[in-house]
Image (cartoon, rainbow, N blue to C red):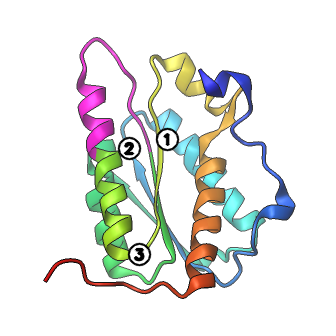
Amino acid sequence: MASSLKNLSAYDDSSIPAANEMCFGIVVSEWNKEITHALYEACYDTLIKHGAKPDHIYTEQVPGSFELPAGAKILASGEKVDAVICLGCVIKGETSHNEYINQAVATALAHMSMVSSKPFVFGVLTPNDQQQALDRAGGKHGNKGVEAAVTAIRMAALKQKYGVSKQKIGF
């Protein structure tokens, strides 16, 4: 497993653009609350650390990870945000429900990013068990919330650099 070899929270501070002029949306799944709220706190703190203003960070909760794309779309439709970060945790368990949920969420977020030219960041943990989730939500492998925030800042800066605007796809 790649994350077993590194800390997800480790990155070069000097490579992160200033976020002081950026606005962010964060959508957090209530399912696996102990994990997702730890992801949220690290994500929020990382945005602030890099200059995001508290009143430029909009947060909404949704029931589960499956609802993250709809929540993200609603938030992005109601607020002018440069990127939307989706935080969740789907633990494998005894059935293959995780495969369906994770694939659906990843596909929806990628699709919304492409259609809207706005970054929708996949900050969903996909562990095999509770301990792996804890290890990636502030434990020995860092916190994926930090990674999601850094990704959002970098992608929002990339969009600003090239002046990408919403483009029509199709007719």
| Residue 63 appears in the figure | no
Segment tinted magenta in the rendering: 88-104
Name above or below for residue 128 compared with residue 107.
above
Disc ID at residue 87: none
Q: Quadrant of the N terminus?
A: top right
Between marks 1 and 3, how big is the CA–CA gap? Answer: 26 Å
Discs 1, 2 touching: Cβ within 8 Å? yes
> In the image, 128: left or right of 139?
left
Front residue of 40/151: it is 151
Within 10 Å of disc 2 (Cα), the crowding (few <14, some 14-19, many 20+) is some
Residue at horizontal 60%, vertical 42%? Answer: 144
Residue at horizontal 74%, vertical 33%? Answer: 7
| Residue 61 appears in the figure | yes
Front residue of 148/55: it is 148
The amino acid pointed to by label 3 is: Ser
Front residue of 32/72: it is 72
Between marks 1 and 2, how big is the CA–CA gap? Answer: 7 Å
- Residue 103, horizontal then vertical, whole percent: 30, 39
Q: Quick one: SS at disc 2?
A: loop
Q: Is residue 89 magenta?
A: yes
Q: According to the image, label 1 marks what residue?
A: 36
